[in-house]
Image (cartoon, coloured by chain):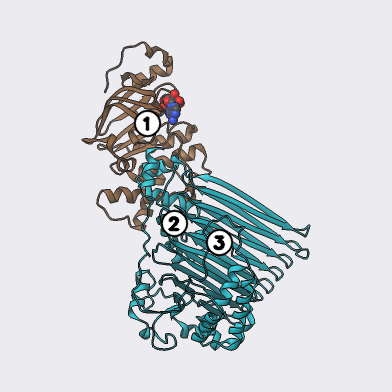
Amino acid sequence: MTDQSQQLESITQREYKAGFVTDIEAESLPPGLSEDVIREISRIKGEPEFMLEWRLKAYRHWLTMDTPEWAHVHYPEIDYQQISYYSAPKKKDDGPKSLDEVDPELLRTYEKLGVPLDERARLAGVAVDAVFDSVSVASTFQDKLAEEGIIFMPISQAVKEHPELVEKYLGSVVPYKDNYYAALNSAVFSDGSFVYIPKGVRCPMELSTYFRINAANTGQFERTLIIADDDAYVSYLEGCTAPMRDENQLHAAVVELVALDRAEIKYSTVQNWYPGDENGKGGIYNFVTKRAACRGESSKVSWTQVETGSAITWKYPSVVLQGDNSIGEFYSVAVTNNMQQADTGTKMIHLGKNTSSTIISKGISAGRSQNAYRGLVRVGPNAENARNYTECDSLLMGDKCGAHTFPYIEVKNPTAKVEHEASTSKISEDQLFYCKQRGLDAEDAVSMIVNGFCKQVIRELPMEFAVEAQNLLGLSLEGSVG
Amino acid sequence: MLEIKNLHASVEGKEILRGINMTVNPGEVHAIMGPNGAGKSTLSNVLAGRDGYEVTQGEVIYKGENLLELEPEERAQRGVFLAFQYPVEIPGVSNIYLLKAALNAVRKYQGLDEVDAIDFLNLVRDRMKLVKMDEQFLHRNVNEGFSGGEKKRNEILQMAVLEPALAILDETDSGLDIDALRVVAEGVSALRAEDRSIVMITHYQRLLDHIVPDFVHVLSEGKIVKSGDKELAKELEKSGYSWVHDAPEGQTA
Ligand SMILES: Nc1ncnc2c1ncn2[C@@H]1O[C@H](COP(=O)(O)OP(=O)(O)OP(=O)(O)O)[C@@H](O)[C@H]1O
Ligand SMILES: [Mg+2]
């Protein structure tokens, strides 16, 4: 090993800045899962009957299912009876009406995380829904958005205030039978965001949700549903962090997007869950089902994700291209360091005519981590003139990590054009030396080179978050290069 | 400025530099010539602090400090600049981004604030004129897809922006056409200054027609075998390197 890589290895152990715990009184359900627990969750949330029925159906189905084992990740079996399915900061009544009612300790927590909830302190163009463990604790700009007819609220609130929309769309993209974690989520989901953009409305600001896991031994079961009606547009961003704990914690989310005629949804994720320590102790299991339906003609959905955290990431934000001329995009950066494992990618399902999809995936592996891209491009028999372009690049830092690519292509229509490009490279000593010779220290040099590698993806992020993502990439990779 | 004393260095156990002595004073321009494989690039890499070279004997004093103890970036921040024989491509990183990061790194060491965006742009535009580079190169990725000649110009642009105290130019003239050679040479000449020393590694006399050196050294098999003034380069051009081999070791400048 050269001096340079030794030196770089010594700065591998980044500090996880979001690792603090908020000391707040919480109401939690005791660990364990049963129909009674589900009834209790539904009761606490004051849900209408249809919601409880749906949860129970999902739960009964989940009981018949097995844990998926096809992903390139390894972890001890999860004991679902050891997890608490509901934890919420204690509060007076039914959810925050205004920021004045939010516990100042919570406001401080979000401020520390760089997400001030005070509307005056916010970036003017961003509305935030803040989810703390199982509940939404604050949601900004609701009134202003309502003036445009936009609904942006915690899904638990939408279940009560807009049951007709929830009943119509919930599970319409990801049915509860879809997979093991989706079924579990459907049974016990806690909170998440609900967005409805009415016909012809361009949402005037970025909408964002900030997920925070705080309580120990709790699972977070986020459920997000976004509907863009005809000719509507919305850009939505989610961020995630959790305290440093020695135990693994489960985050099993389901996100559904529905784009109707000529609607466009841009969904960006900056995922920085606690990744565990350098020996792989602790960290979040991030098992997520994200899927969009381009239901209307000429509709468009873009997924952009920067995944730096979590002990294990298992997620494949996908697009079902039902409408003719619809477009699906997936831009991804997945960074793994130390003992992290990521198995991530996308599915592009072409059903309508003249549909097109683009997949740009950048995997960066350091330490002893494992990073896999898994992608499916399926072109159905009626999808005339479908187009797909896939580019899949891996960057290795050091020689103890792994990068894997599993592209699946199924084409049932001869007019389809599907292109796939892949590359694997290493950060070269030459590049590092060149940057250092120009005065940059090792950390800045690595960060610059990695950001260059990810540029195609980073530039898809909304401005304000691109900077955050760039910094995060640098931090996650203060890492081994060989 | 720079004092190299009995410098020995090896790569993978093989001794490449075998007792280099050289003194460079502020404002001087030194040319180093010598056959392929003589150790010219090795010398510049050792001075810049590249990994993989083991200094087995000797020392290098730069502005009163032991240069060999410093990290490459510390040397750069203190004003040691190496124009690479083979400039490196960095995909996805724009030229202007690297330039700015580099300038700010140097400024930080000097205790200055980060450069103001407008000032920076003005500075870069001004320096681009020096090497007659088009502005589009600022927004292209560092050296990616640059022609050989464009890469070399880009190195000199970086030098012009960073204003180093000691510039080591490793075959900056190789791969340049006649016009480009003149442009680059004029650029470098314009950067000659009282308080700046330049060490140029070259194979060709023609560069030295444009940038007249104060001293010329011949490096062969890891040693400086002859030193002289610009006339030495002319003789080399005529007679090749073979005649210096048997000559007694030249006086170091
Ligand atoms: N990393 C390395 N591994 C093995 N040998 C090396 C390495 N670097 C340099 N050398 C050897 O050291 C000797 C000197 O190389 P160097 O690049 O310094 O020569 P040079 O004088 O710059 O030649 P040129 O005029 O061709 O650029 C050569 O024989 C070269 O093969
Ligand atoms: Mg050389």
Chain that is cyan in the image: A
Residue highlighted by disc 3? A314
Nearest to the observer: residue B7 or residue A250: A250
Task: Output the chain of dot 1.
Answer: B
Tell me, yes or no, whether the two marked residues, 3 and 1, touch with CB atoms within 8 Å. no
- Mark identifier at residue B148: none
Q: Is residue B40 something one can see in this rendering?
A: yes
User: Ligand 1 lies in which image quarter?
Assistant: top left
What colour do you see for chain B? brown
How far apart are the alpha carbons under marks 3 and 2?
Answer: 19 Å
Q: Secondary structure at mark 3?
A: strand
Q: Is mark 2 within 8 Å of ligand 1?
A: no
Dot 1 crowding, Cα within 10 Å, few <14, some 14–19, many 20+: some
Q: Position of residue A177 (x, y in %)?
A: 65, 72
How far apart are the alpha carbons under marks 2 and 1?
Answer: 31 Å
Q: Secondary structure at mark 1?
A: strand
Q: Position of residue B182 (x, y in %)?
A: 43, 34
* Furthest residue toward left: B64
Q: Is residue A143 above or below residue A423?
A: below
Residue highlighted by disc 1? B53
How far apart are the alpha carbons under marks 3 and 1?
Answer: 44 Å
Q: Position of residue A60 (x, y in %)?
A: 63, 76
Tell me, yes or no, whether the two marked residues, 2 and 1, touch with CB atoms within 8 Å. no
Sequence-first tag of 3 and 2? 3
Residue highlighted by disc 2? A473
Q: Amino acid at mark 2?
A: Leu
Q: Are marks 3 and 1 on the same chain?
A: no
Q: Are marks 2 and 1 on the same chain?
A: no
Q: Residue at x 32, y 55 (%)?
A: B115
